[in-house]
Amino acid sequence: MKIGNSIRLKISFWSAVLLVLAVGLSFLAVRFSSGLVLRSINREYLIDAVEKNVGMIRFAEAQDHREANSYIPYKNGFLEIDEDFLKEMGGVFAALYDGEGTLLYGEDPLARQTGTRSFRNTGIWYAESGGETYILYDRSIRQDQIGDLWLRGMVSETKSLAPLASITRLSLILLPILILLAVLALYLVTDRMLKPLKDVETAAGDIARGDKLDRRIEGIRTEDEVGQLAATFNQMMEKLEASFEREKQFTSDASHELRTPTSVILAQTEYTLEKERSAEEYREALEVVHKQGERMSALIRDMLDYSRMDLSAERYPLTPLNLSELVRETADALAPVGDSPLQYRVELEENVQIKGNENLLSRLLQNLISNAYRYGDPEGKIRICLERKESGVILSVEDDGPGIPREEQEKIFERFYRSDSSRNAQGTGLGLALVKKIAQIHGAEVWLESEEDRGSRFIILFPVFF
C-alpha cells in the first residue's frame, strides 16, 4: 500500500473514533447539564411565584367594592385576593387551600386528576400523574384571623423538559450524519496534506532506482511539521550528495596516487625479469620495489585513518589532557640528532589544558613537524610554539622553506593536493588533510600563514577548556 493511502486511512479511522468519542461525550455533558439547569430554573421559578402570591392574600372583615380584588367568604370575614394573584403563568399553577384541603382559589391540575390533598411544608417535592412528573411547592400561610391556609404551586417537569427531549432526538439523527460528512471531508483533505510525504516517497524511490542524488522536494514553504520534514529531507540529500561526491573524488584521487607506485613496481619487475640479472641488479630492483611498497603502505594507512575519522569521529573520545606535555614529548621525539645545522626551537607555555584525544593530537603534531622537515630549509629553522590566549589555545609550527603561493593556500588542506613546490617531495598527500580533520574533531580552527621564499606557519586554535 502506498504511504499516502495507508496514512490517510489511519488518520481518517482514528479521527472518526476520536470525533465520535468527543461528540458523544460532549452531547452527554450538554444533555445532562441542560437538564440540571432547566430543573433548577423550574424550581426557582416555582418558589418565586408561590412566594409572590403569598403577599397577595389578606383577611378583610368586609368587602371593598372600590377594589377589583376577589373576596372569598372565610370564617367571620373574607379572604381578599389581590388582582395580581397569578393562577397560572409560564406553566406554573397556584392554588389556595384551607386546612381541610378544600380548594378556595386558583388552579390545581394535579388535584383534579388525582384528588391529592396532602400538604408538605418541607420544600420541593415530586408527584406523578397521568404519565407526567410534577414539581410541587407547598407554603403554609398563618396570619392573625386567617388560621390555617396552604398555598400550593406546581409545574409539569415533563412538559418543561419536552423541548430538551426533542432536541435530543433531533441531535441523535443529525450528529451521526455530520460525523460521517466530517470524516469524508477529512479523508479528502488529508490527500493534500500528505502530498509532501508522497513527494518524499517518490524522491526516495527515484534515488533507490536511479541513484539520483540531486533529487529535491520543491514547492513546500510551510513552517509546519511537513514543511520541516521536506526541508530536513533536502538537507539530508545535500549532505548525502556531497558525501558521495567526496567519496567519488577520494576514490579517483586514491586510484591516481596508487597508479604511480604500482606502475613503477610492474615496470621494474617486468624489466628485471626479461633476462638474467646480476645480484647487484636484482638488489637495485628490489630496493625500488621496496621503496614504492612503503609509499603504497603509507598511503593506504593514511587513507584508512582519514576514512575512520570522517565516518566515525565518535570513536575518538575527547578527555582533559595537558597539551604542553604532549607537545614537548612529541617534539623531543622528532628532534634532529647529531650535528644537524637545523635550528629546532620549542617554546611552550606550561600546563596548558585542553579537551582532546592524545593519539590524534600526537598524529597532528607529527604531520606538521614532518612537513616542516620535508619542505623547510635543511639548514634553516623549525619553531614550535604553544601559548594560551583569550581567544583560545594556539599551537603553531613554523618553517623557513620556500613558502606557498597565496592562490594555493586554501587548497593545501584538500586530500592529495600538492603545491608546485612540493611535487617532488615524499609524502602521501593526506598529511594536511588529516591535520584539518583532527582539528575539526577537536572543534579547533586551522589555517596557514605563508609568503613565498619566507616560509610557512601552520596555526591551530583550540577552544578554551576550563
Image: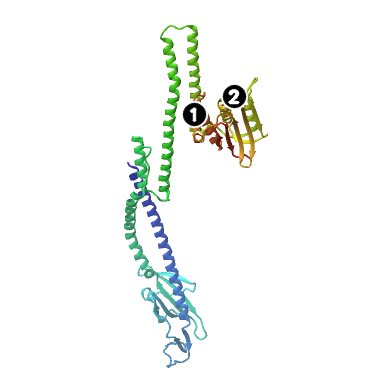
Q: Position of residue 115 (x, y in %)?
A: 38, 75
Q: Nearer the viewer, residue 294 or 1?
A: 294
Relative vertical location of residue 9 with respect to residue 151 in this rendering, above or below: above
Q: CA distance from mark 1 to mark 2?
A: 19 Å
Q: Earlier in the sequence, mark 1 or mark 2?
A: 2
Res 339 seen here = yes
- Single out the residue that lies furthest toward the front: 453
Quarter containing the N terminus: top left
Residue carrying label 1: 420
Dot 1: few (<14), some (14–19), or many (≥20) neighbours within 10 Å? few
Give left or right: position of 164 versus 352: left
Q: Is residue 290 above or below residue 158?
A: above
Determine the residue located farthest toward the right in the rendered image: 350
The quarter in which the C terminus is drawn is top right
The disc placed on residue 62 is: none
Quarter occupied by residue 356: top right
Badge 2 element: loop
Task: Return the x and y of residue 393 as percentages of the image width and height.
Answer: 62, 38
Amino acid type at image mark 2? Pro
Q: Is residue 366 left or right of residue 248?
A: right
Q: Secondary structure at mark 1?
A: helix
Whether 231 is drawn above or below 177: the answer is above
- Expressed as whole percent of the image width and height from the top left, the position of residue 364 reads 57, 30
Q: Nearer the viewer, residue 413 or 155?
A: 413
* Residue at which label 2 appears: 378
x, y percent for residue 383: 62, 30
Task: Give whichever of 207, 71 is nearer the camera.
Answer: 207
Tag 1: amino acid: Asp
Count neighbours of disc 2 (C-alpha within 10 A) and say few if under 14, some if 14 to 19, many if 20 or more: some
Taking 456 as reference, is 114 left or right? left
